[in-house]
Structure formats: structure tokens, C-alpha cells
């Protein structure tokens, strides 16, 4: 019996995937454990191994084309096996039981003309007619020219209802208004013709855009900034690095200090779940890593229980895996707090969008020499600014301020971090 392989869900945020490369072609012998294809997800490029023995009878996805999870990807079976019933099932057509076509004829027809007679065409973008939606929602969407497949349903089993369409329309209106406002204050410039480049949007970039947009619009953000004197930690870091085989970065010290501050302020280490707030009894710090296609957030698990050098080693390993697209789901799932550091790029201060499902994200700027007053005397000090972005549904201003005060105390008296 022929076995079907669908586009798998390889991460908790993945909604569609892209075949980066096929390692088997139609007609090739396949054994369980053989590398079948490479799949580009929203986080990394991952290898897909076959679970079945047989011959690859069908490839349903083109290289480089994004398709939803569950799309027919491949069929593995015996040589000459009839797969027309499977193709008909996925294309939404009925099987002609009197058909005399064998699997080789189906394969040839698929390769030469994938959409011939509608029998081997694999639908990769859902049509509005096949999407679950109430009649009223369909009517409103049709009148407003809104594609239903772009709307996330909140009804039973993901069914799109009137409220979902209206909310979507309102969001689009707000985006258009913001664009017009920006345009209205932008000096006019001559319109000239010239060359341009269109860049394919990767699965990673799509997911970043979707998740951060959802975060910014759904979580009411507020921001708290504090200055931290880094003179003592600069000196202590030099001493530690002089005697340790592992060279620590300032970000490693920030990760450790944040994890210790979260111990004292556990309500910051939480998530909004709609009808309840979940406070975590473990501390997993997500560390934002810039890669060519966007931003990945590998996780340092139980950071409060690890030493500075352990955090440094693990961070370097995860950053290398992120840049090589080798991260696995276990590397990026389960964060309870996130740190984003742009200090190494010369940024003094910035605000970051909360990384769901966290209640907060800490934006870390660079260390800068500035005049400071100490004991009535003006001198030079090394100051670092950090900004805490807070989800106001979970964190109040006083709560966030208390957390930052604890963090400041730890970084300004860094020997406490080593105890």
C-alpha cells in the first residue's frame, strides 16, 4: 500500500514550509532513514528522513514554493502502484474507478502537466470556498474584497465569524492610515525610473513579521529605561576572563543577572493566557541572535542555575547553530523572558517588541563613557542603558521598575552574581 508524506509541522509557529532541496527523485528507491528532502521552516532548514521503504512515486511540491502544512509532499510505494486515488483525494476530485491508468502513467502526466484535467493538481493555497466561515462572514468579506484565507478564525474549530472579518478590516484600515500619515509629512521627491531588486520573503521573515505584529497589536506595551554603571563589572569581567578558559561577554553577565533578578520578581517570569496568567517556576532566557534572514531566539534553559562560563559556552554554541540554520525545536522553544542586545552595533538605547509568550523583553544598549557625578565630584563613568518592554496585562509599572532596580544592583555590584 502506498504511503503518503505531507508537509510536516516542524515548529510550534510553523504554518507553511518550503522545499529547499529534494534528495530523491521520482523513480528512486527509498529506504526508511534515507534523506528525502530539506525543508525550510520559519526557524531553520531541517532534514526530512523517510519513514518508509519503497519507490518514490510522486513529488507534490516544487523547490522554493511555500505551501501550507498538510500539503501532499510525496508518495512512496511499490513500482507501478496505482496512486490515482490518493491524488484525487488531495486534489478534491473523485476517483474514476474504471480508469485503466497505472502509477507510471500518473507520474508521467504529473511531471509533464501537473494540472492536467485537475486529477494530479495539488492545491497549495486554500480557496475561500473551502475555508470554514459563517455565511455572514463570507458575505462581509466578499463585499469588502477581503481574502478569507488571510483571516484567523476564532470560532469553533477555527471557523471565521463576523467579528474576525471586521477586526481584520479595522487592522487594514489602521495600517493604511499610518502609511498615509507618514506619506503626508514626507517631502515630495521626483519620481524616477531605475533598477530595483525583489527579494523572496523567507519562511523565517514571514513568521517574524506575523508574530511581532500580533505581539505589538495584541499586547499593550509600555517601556521603562534605566542607566547602569558598568565600571565594576568591566573590571570583574577582565579578572574572570584572565583566569578562565571561557571568555565571557557582557551579554553573558546580563543573562545571568536577569535570571537572578527574575528569581526575586517571579511575576515578571510569566505569560498571558487569556483567562489566566501563567507564572513559570523555571527561568529560560531567550537570547536574540541576528542572522542573515532575520532574528532567531535560542533559549538558555534554567539560566539561574548555571554559571557565567556555562552560559557563555552555551550561548556561543546556540549562536553558531542559528547562523548555520542547525537549530532544532528544542533549542528555541520554552522561553520565559527574552534579551535583545544591540550594544555591539553601537546602539545606545532602543525599545524591543515583546517576544511571545513572554511578559517582557529587555533591550540592552552599548556601554558608553559619559561624565558622572560621584561623591560630589565629576568624573568619567561607563554607563549602559537598558529598556524593559512590558505587557501591561501582566506587569504594572511599579513591578517593572522594581525588577530593573534589582537588575541594576546586581550589575553594579557584580560579585553578587558569582555567589
Image: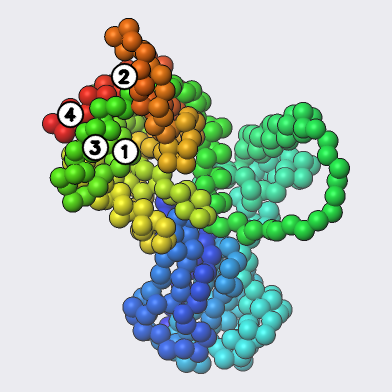
Q: Residue at x 47, y 31 (%)?
A: 348
**Local SS, label 3:** helix
| Contact (Cβ within 8 Å) of mark 3 with mark 4 | no
| Contact (Cβ within 8 Å) of mark 3 with mark 1 | yes
Which mark is first along the chain, 1 or 3? 3
Which mark is first along the chain, 1 or 4? 1
Q: CA distance from mark 2 to mark 1?
A: 18 Å
Q: Position of residue 3 (x, y in %)?
A: 44, 78
Which mark is first along the chain, 1 or 2? 1
- Number of labels in the image equals 4
Q: Nearer the viewer, residue 14 or 400?
A: 400
Around disc 4, counting alpha carbons within 10 Å, would you say few (fewer than 14), some (14 to 19), or many (20 or more)? few
Q: Position of residue 413 (x, y in %)?
A: 22, 24
Quadrant (top left/top right/bottom left/bottom right) for the N terminus: bottom left
On the image, numbered disc 1 is attached to which residue? 250
Q: CA distance from mark 2 to mark 4?
A: 17 Å
Identify the mark at residue 237; answer none if there is no mark.
Answer: 3
On the image, numbered disc 4 is attached to which residue? 415
Q: Nearer the viewer, residue 40 or 99?
A: 40
On the image, numbered disc 2 is attached to which residue? 405
Front label number (3 vs 4):
3
Q: CA distance from mark 3 to mark 2?
A: 21 Å
Which mark is first along the chain, 4 or 2? 2
Quadrant (top left/top right/bottom left/bottom right) for the C terminus: top left
In the image, farthest residue toward the left? 419
Q: Quadrant of residue 146?
A: top right
Amino acid at each position: 500500500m502506498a504511503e503518503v508524506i505531507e508537509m510536516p509541522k516542524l515548529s510550534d509557529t510553523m504554518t507553511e514550509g518550503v522545499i529547499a532541496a529534494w534528495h530523491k527523485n521520482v523513480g528512486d528507491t527509498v529506504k526508511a532513514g534515507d534523506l528525502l528532502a530539506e525543508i525550510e521552516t520559519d526557524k531553520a532548514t531541517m532534514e526530512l528522513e523517510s519513514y518508509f521503504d519503497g519507490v518514490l512515486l510522486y513529488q507534490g511540491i516544487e523547490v522554493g514554493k511555500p505551501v501550507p502544512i498538510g500539503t501532499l509532499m510525496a508518495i512512496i510505494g511499490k513500482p507501478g502502484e496505482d496512486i490515482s486515488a490518493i491524488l484525487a483525494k488531495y486534489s478534491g476530485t473523485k476517483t474514476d474507478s474504471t480508469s485503466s491508468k497505472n502509477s507510471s502513467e500518473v507520474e508521467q502526466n504529473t511531471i509533464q502537466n501537473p494540472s492536467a484535467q485537475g486529477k494530479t493538481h495539488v492545491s497549495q493555497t486554500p480557496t475561500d470556498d473551502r475555508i470554514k466561515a459563517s455565511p455572514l462572514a463570507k458575505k462581509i468579506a466578499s463585499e469588502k474584497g477581503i481574502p478569507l484565507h488571510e483571516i484567523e478564525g476564532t470560532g469553533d474549530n477555527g471557523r471565521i465569524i463576523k467579528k474576525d472579518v471586521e477586526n481584520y478590516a479595522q487592522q487594514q484600515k489602521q495600517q493604511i492610515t499610518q502609511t498615509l500619515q507618514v506619506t503626508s509629512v514626507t517631502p515630495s521627491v521626483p519620481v524616477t525610473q531605475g533598477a530595483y531588486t525583489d527579494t523572496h520573503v523567507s519562511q523565517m521573515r514571514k513568521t517574524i513579521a506575523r508574530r511581532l505584529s500580533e505581539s505589538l497589536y495584541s499586547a499593550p506595551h509600555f517601556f521603562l529605561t534605566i542607566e547602569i554603571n558598568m565600571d565594576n563589572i568591566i573590571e570583574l569581567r577582565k579578572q574572570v576572563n584572565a583566569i578562565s578558559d571561557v571568555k565571557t561577554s557582557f551579554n553573558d553577565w546580563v543573562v545571568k543577572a536577569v535570571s537572578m533578578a527574575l528569581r526575586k520578581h517571579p511575576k515578571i517570569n510569566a505569560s498571558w493566557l487569556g483567562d489566566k496568567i501563567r507564572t513559570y517556576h523555571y527561568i529560560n532566557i531567550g537570547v536574540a541572535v541576528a542572522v542573515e534572514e532575520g532574528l532567531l531566539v535560542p533559549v538558555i534553559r534554567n539560566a539561574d542555575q548555571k554559571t557565567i562560563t556555562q552560559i557563555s559556552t552555551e550561548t556561543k554554541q546556540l549562536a553558531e547553530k542559528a547562523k548555520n540554520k542547525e537549530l532544532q525545536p528544542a533549542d528555541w522553544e520554552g522561553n520565559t523572558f527574552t534579551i535583545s542586545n544591540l550594544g555591539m552595533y553601537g546602539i545606545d538605547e532602543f525599545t524591543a517588541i515583546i517576544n511571545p509568550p513572554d511578559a517582557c523583553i529587555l533591550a540592552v544598549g552599548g556601554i558608553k563613557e559619559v561624565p558622572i557625578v560621584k561623591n560630589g565630584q565629576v568624573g568619567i563613568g561607563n554607563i549602559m542603558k537598558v529598556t524593559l518592554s512590558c505587557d501591561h496585562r501582566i506587569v504594572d509599572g511599579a513591578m517593572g521598575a522594581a525588577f530593573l532596580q534589582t537588575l541594576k544592583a546586581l550589575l553594579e555590584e557584580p560579585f553578587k552574581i558569582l555567589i
